[in-house]
Amino acid sequence: MRGCEVAVVGFEHQILRTDVSGMPLEWIGYQEAVRLYYLDQVAYACGGVLYRVRGGFNALTGARSVVTLNSIIATEGSVQAARKGLPGYVPPLNNQTLFRRDDQICLYCGNRFPRSQLSRDHVTPTSRGGRDCWTNVVTACKRCNNHKGARTPEEAGMQLLAVPFAPTHAEYVYLQGRRVLADQMEFLRAHFPRSSPLRLRRQPLAPPR
């Protein structure tokens, strides 16, 4: 944002945006957070202080404006955003979040790989009527995926190490985060289902190179 200075240097942590009820919505950068403050759309903030952004000087008093940004801010969410917290909502499927859901582990051989060596495998192949959905896809290394081919795990003699699941919106937000802070993780975990396998995770893996 032009004319602003950020008082904290180092990694650019993301800010967790929620609606006024506390439902996690998305990750935003400090520029977007300052814009929301400027538009008076921030209802309240919680978590630790991440940044203090200094703006322009008041022509009358000479005082300089300062916006303090916490790690979590609550804003007025749209109706469309609020629907993401409903039980029937299913987040969009994409490989990046799929690989993070499975901790970048091949669910056939059990080894962890960089993103470039991973692929999306359909447990029941699409050629056999399998759907391209969260509950029918797992992370697989390219070698295991090629070996399995258009067969089911049973037909290929391969054991599936975990049951694929569709993340809730809160889990999906978590999986999209990078360098998730402890207070953000605690806040998000409170919105996870009790049976969520993500509860024991500390934070998502860093984006693969």
Image (cartoon, grey):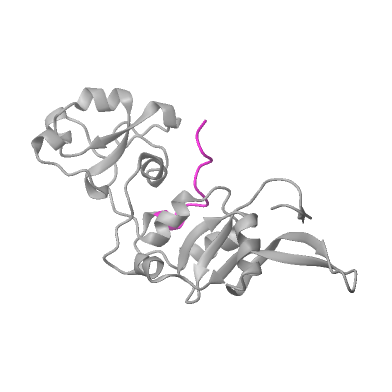
> Which image quadrant for residue 113?
top left
* Residue found 41% across the figure and 57% down from its top: 171
Residue 35's x, y, as percent? 63, 62
Q: Is 202 inside the magenta-drawn segment?
A: yes
Residue 52's x, y, as percent? 75, 61
Q: Quick check: can you spot residue 66? A: yes
Q: Is 3 inside the magenta-drawn segment?
A: no
> Start and end of the magenta stretch?
198-209
Above or below — where is 168 with respect to 207? below
* Residue found 35% across the figure and 60% down from its top: 168
* Residue found 46% across the figure and 68% down from its top: 190
Q: Quick check: can you spot residue 113? A: no
Depth check: give the residue in front, 84 or 34: 34
Residue 152 located left or right of residue 39: left
Residue 48's x, y, as percent? 67, 65
* Residue found 75% across the figure and 59% down from its top: 53
Depth check: give the residue in front, 54 or 152: 54
Residue 125's x, y, as percent? 15, 35
- In the current view of this chain or complex, which residue is farthest to the front? 59
Residue 48 located left or right of residue 147: right
Name the chief secondary structure element in magenta. Answer: loop
Residue 3 located left or right of residue 72: right
